[in-house]
Image (tube, grey):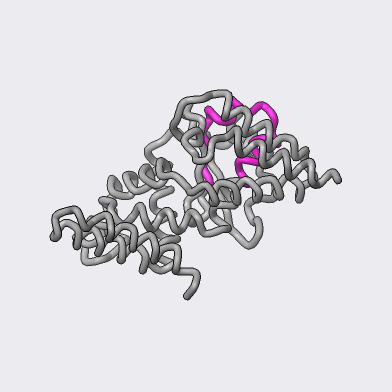
Amino acid sequence: MLKRLPLFFALVGLLSALAACDLSKGLDAAGDAYKSVTLSDAEIQQLGRDSAAQLDAQNPVAQKGDPYARRLNKIMGNLRKEDGLTLNFKVYKVKDVNAFALPDGSVRVFAGLLDLMKDDNEVLFVLGHEIGHVKNGDSKDRFKLVYATSAARKSADAAGGTASAISKSALADLGEAFIHAQYSQKQEYEADAYGYQILKKYKKNTAAAVAALRALQSLGGSGGMLSSHPDSGDRADRIQKMIDADKK
């Protein structure tokens, strides 16, 4: 029961914000949010898989034998079965610097990020970070909240509540909304710590975590992984403190 409290407070905040809005619209939005919270884990997993499939269909995916696919396959090593999770990885051949993981364990890395990070251990940290969001339940919670106001939910309602009948375009929109939504400061810090532990677990150079975040910091601007809160420089400083503490 206690695990539902963060979502409960999110709903309370939403309802407070709706007080100044049109009542009928407010009730509709509140109902959407409630339905998103009550989605079962199985429904979230299926919607995550379906969204990943549609995003894959609409983005250029690096195929087997492609240099990007070969590099990612090398980096991810044993990560297909990590910490009780079943994960799958693909590269989108687009220039954006980004990566994300849907709640079903579909991890996607953009070619722009692989181009930026020449050290494979830096990429491994990013993969670990994204896996951390899945393991910590962040991806699931964010997916629920995005789904609340998505075309996918409305598409499901129109089909009598059948998730399997959601339109492809609605699933793609849901996936895009998920990619561009932000995690909280606490969630980002915890995912960074998880990525750091992945480097330690596989006996990699942990300084790569700091280098990865510094690389993101150097780009400036916003969008994708660059739009996180807190900024990458602050996150890099925190990881460096972890490294220093481990050396003592």
* Above or below, 34 relative to 74: below
Can residue 109 be seen? yes
* Figure quadrant of residue 208: top right
Q: Is residue 91 visible?
A: no
Which residue is pictured at 50% across the width and 55% down the height? 138
What residue is shown at x 48% (from left), y 49% (from top)? 184
Image side of residue 169 versus residue 245, left or right: left
Residue 124 percent location from the top left of the image: 66, 40
On the image, the x and y values in percent for residue 237 come to 67, 37
Magenta span contains residue 112:
yes
Residue at screen point 27% across, 60% down: 15
User: Taken as a whole, is the magenta stretch helix, strand or loop?
Assistant: helix
Query: Is residue 16 on the magenta stretch?
Result: no
Magenta segment boundaries in residue numbering: 107-128
How far across and down, in percent of the image, does residue 169 sit?
A: 28, 45
Q: Quadrant of residue 45?
A: bottom left
Picture residue at 43% right of the left edge, 48% below the top:
52
